[in-house]
Image (cartoon, rainbow, N blue to C red):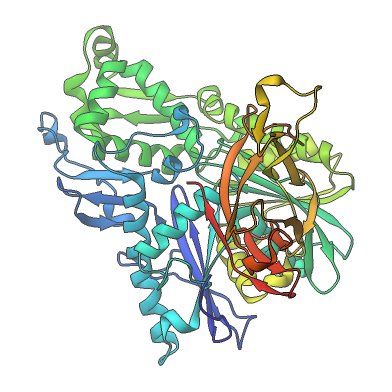
Amino acid sequence: MTTSCSNIRVVVGIDFGTTYSGFAYANVANPEKIETNETWLERKGAFKTNTVIRYDENFELIQWGLPALAEKINKKSKNSKSDNSHKIAELFKLHIGEIPYEHKPPLPSGLNPRKAITDYLREMGKIMKSTISARWPGLIYYQHVRVILTVPVEYDEGVRAIMRQCAFDAELILTLESENLEFTTEPEAAALYCLENLNEHPLKVGDSFLVIDCGGGTVDLTVRTILPNSKLSELTESTGDFCGSTYVDKAFKHFIGTKIGRSALKLMEEKHYPQFQYLIQYFCTDVKLPFDGDERNWRNKEIDLEEICPILLQYVKGEEREELEECEWVIELDFQTVKYFFDQAIENILKLIRQQLTKSEKNISAIFLVGGFSESKYLMHCVRQEFNRQVSYISVPSYPVTSIVKGAVTYGLRMDAIKTRVLRKTYGIELYRNWTPNDPIERKEVIDDQEKMLFFKRLAKKGTEVDVDQEFKNTSWPTFPNQKISSFKLYTTSENDGKHCDDPGMKLFGRLGLELPDVNLGINRPVEFTLTFGKMETRVFARDLISETTAKATFKLEL
């Protein structure tokens, strides 16, 4: 990493979400006053804007945020031609990382999701830069501003490197290696927000609490323990799954397909995506958001396709058309149907909570739900109904939509507030050792008349709670007297350990290079290298043990 952070005057937190995004900021001279941006190009008074981009046919950006969303069209447009000259990209965050194919929503053909992310961050960055420059005249952005970008728990370091590249291409940082960009996970940022607002909740030093970040795409969980001096330790391995609010939308979409026919739904998405998107917006606003799970409060909802999405009618054929014409193109949503839209996502969330409560060795004093989906009254009802006997305090903190972005700013102001993290992977390096007759014959290699074999040497074990700056060390000696460079492959696995680096589940994580000292000393030139895994990005250091001076070390992620 390059540049010094000693000149940082302002910290900006960016919550780049699946469905909505926003930013907040604070001056290091007044850390208690964290301000969330509420002014966008299209309106004022909203903490976030939509994570949506509208392109022309050449993928030149036309609009982003709320203005990129489709608007209602007139009934006279029933037989309108395809309106795909404009290409709308949304949910593109779900296209990076090791995400199963079935969880990746369609993107306009030919659009690289990294381009969409970069374009979106660039546009948000323009507003961000102008906002803080107006707030503090004389600020030199690339010298005085630290950016904290929040990411899901599921993003490993390779994906975070992709996000760093996107942030660099979006001109949020001056150099790719800039220390003025740091990462934190979304639930960790939310936990810091809860820590900063303890006066609202009955918690004290030593208590542990569970944070559930209920976003649009993912739901991430972390258990934290409150330490003295307003610090947090991580108690269990953070977990997450794809069960955010967009999966309620997905269930609704499937239901609509049963009513209008799969072919009609497919044609609608392909030829008139903006209007299909408007139908989903209508569902979210008029059905999903008000649903509280109490049948006594429910009044059946009507979706008038001729009113909301008239362009759809031309594609509905056969029995589906006859049935819809008979009911005048109105689809009625009863209580059980809407409940069904929620049930799978909520059951997955409850399963994640059960797993965290089971893994925790300490009693959990509180559960906090944050993020956009946490505003669902039905979700809160289900969580309380299932866990109120185990956890007495289950709550949504004030302004849950801003909890992550404000927590990100808190992290940037007090990066020592996170004392420990729990490793989500096992880390190790590939080394040679002597081959023995008990080892597989096919793994034997003869090197300089000696029988050797490669093996996986574990450096750090998955599930271990480590200080963020905890060091993991190993010593390397030259193999040959005139050797100038020593290189290693670093691997990760989801298992607790491994034998060989080609075992199932092993993944090449990065390549480590060490510059060896004075060749005149032959092979007696030990170099100690140190890695830290507790930070969000791996750090590597090296030391010449003979001269006790710093040695040059390089580390390159395998992307």
Residue at screen point 46% across, 71% down: 37
Tell me what residue is drawn at x 60 percent, y 42 percent.
219
Would residue 156 be seen by someone viewing this image from the given angle?
no
In the figure, 399 relative to 100: above or below? below
Looking at the image, residue 392 sits to the left or right of residue 144; the answer is: right
Residue 276 position in % (x across, y down): 28, 34
Q: Which quadrant of the view contains residue 527?
A: bottom right
Q: Nearer the viewer, residue 14 or 508?
A: 508
Q: Nearer the viewer, residue 314 or 216?
A: 216
Residue 81 location in percent, x, y? 9, 32
Residue 122 location, quadrant: bottom left
Note whether 356 is above or below 395 in the view shown: above
The vertical placement of 346 against 460, above or below, is: above
Tell me what residue is drawn at x 75 percent, y 75 percent: 548
Residue 234 falls in which quadrant of the image? bottom right
Image location of residue 280, percent across then percent down: 37, 37
Residue 213 in sight here: yes
Left or right position of 259 against 187: left
Residue at x-position 66% and y-position 39%: 448
Judged left or right of residue 465, residue 489 is: left
- Residue 422 at x, y percent in the picture: 75, 51
Answer above or below: position of 440 versus 430: above
Label tally: 0
- Quick check: 78 left or right of 14? left
- Residue lying furthest bottom in this view? 138
User: In the current view of this chain or complex, which residue is farthest to the top?
Assistant: 319
